Image (cartoon, rainbow, N blue to C red):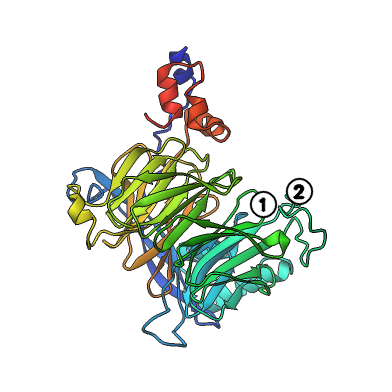
Amino acid sequence: MEEMIFQLALKSEYELGRSTLGLIQPTRKLSDGTEFYVLSKSLQEGPVPVERGGVGTNKGIVRSRTIGELLAPAAPFDKKCGRENWTVAFAPDGSYFAWSQGHRTVKLVPWSQCLKNFLLHGTKNITNSSSLRLSRQNSDGAQKNKPREHIIDCGDIVWSLAFGSSVPEKQSRCVNIEWHRFRFGQDQLLLATGLNNGRIKIWDVYTGKLLLNLVDHTEVVRDLTFAPDGSLILVSASRDKTLRVWDLKDDGNMMKVLRGHQNWVYSCAFSPDSSMLCSVGASKAVFLWNMDKYTMIRKLEGHHHDVVACDFSPDGALLATASYDTRVYIWDPHTGDILMEFGHLFPPPTPIFAGGANDRWVRSVSFSHDGLHVASLADDKMVRFWRIDEDYPVQVAPLSNGLCCAFSTDGSVLAAGTHDGSVYFWATPRQVPSLQHLCRMSIRRVMPTQEVQELPVPSKVLEFLSYRI
């Protein structure tokens, strides 16, 4: 039985070609000062010896191919602070990309158009700005309702961004209220921005207009996340040590406060089915919350320093957390077990070193949409791509002063923001998922670990479904 199951599975070890390291040159500067950079030439690169997370491994690791860059405009305000790009985000449908340019501004660009400019003009080695401008005008003139660029002045330093989309079938949780100021249609796309003054502003992505101004936090809004089920439930994480739950279909009603953190809250993330929330902050613990009852499920212990970022796998079976202790942990959120450790320093540091000031602080972590890869960004000027079943990176990319990273909706590109308000893009490791893995993801989307363990299947299959082999 067990052999038959595994014999029917497809091979998944095939990697799509060799990666290249791109040389990039500027092609144009937009009216707002944003510079587009595209890949103008590529050098064929073989595997390069890099660290096994840290230093000194003989295993060759491929450099990721640079897709392009978006550079921030010259700072109109104080150059000493506020320029940081703390957050980047892709719309759920892949239509838009947003990033904080620093100094209160957020830039919204149509992602397909942006990517087309990178790839088309990069491969053709075009550096004439008029050629790029003409292609953009032609594409915009073909359909007036196509996504357009927007520059949003948020009025204060932007620390967090999140896209949210509406599903009409998902009603407001405040069922007793029949009248609402806003009626969100099926194609509604919103952008939430968390500000330095504790306010959260909700914008219409298609028009760039301000819809709501949410006021309740008393400190910086460090992170935002929308429930993936289309209910427009928004959770905000703040330095005021709280998480707040907002119902945008109820005109932004603040419906719940989640307390439990004893210090700043850095990041939060919904599970794919919206039933669970993870939050991390200036402590060594990872908090898991039941979003039906708004109660804490458990605290995960294992990190030796502040935990600053978290993300669920697409099937909700795994949770990735990044910490200043130089590590990324992969957890089973249903049991609290650590399944994998991705170290950014080799040999692994002692708890005393990991818990102090070191130059390998991991700033951000993101799960790919195939569920096979994780990207991490650290202070050692490297972006790493990991397979979930290997303890060394499969691809790397150089990046100085990185702060955040996120996969595109289709998982083909990783975007990373830096201290100067710029964004860098890389091609991600591509791999044909095995039939085994696709079946596992389908099962784990609807079954937690406890239910999987009760299935009448061989032990090896149970281990595979539980991501333990």
Q: Quadrant of residue 273?
A: top right
Dot 2, how many residues are within 10 Å of its Cα: few (below 14), some (14-19), or many (20+)?
A: few
Q: Which of 379 and 159 is in front in this view?
A: 159
Q: Which of 435 and 440 is in front in this view?
A: 440
- Looking at the rendered structure, the kind of residue marked 2 is Glu
Q: Where is residue 424 in the image (x, y as percent from the top left)?
A: 42, 65
Q: Which of 395 and 232 is in front in this view?
A: 232
Which residue corresponds to mark 2? 169
- Looking at the rendered structure, the kind of residue marked 1 is Gly
Placement of the C terminus among the 4 image quadrants: top left
Q: Tell whether label 2 touches label 1 (CB within 8 Å).
A: yes
Element type at mark 2:
loop
Q: Residue at x 48, y 72 (%)?
A: 219
Is 82 situated left or right of 234 in this image?
A: left
Q: Which of 63 and 456 is in front in this view?
A: 456
Element type at mark 1:
loop
Q: Residue at x 18, y 54 (%)?
A: 352
Which residue corresponds to mark 1? 230
Q: Which residue is drawn at 68% across and 70% down?
A: 140
Q: Is residue 32 visible?
A: yes
For the residues marked 1 and 2, what is the alpha-carbon distance in whole angstroms? 9 Å
Is residue 464 depicted above or below 361 in this figure? above
Residue with the most extreme top position: 1
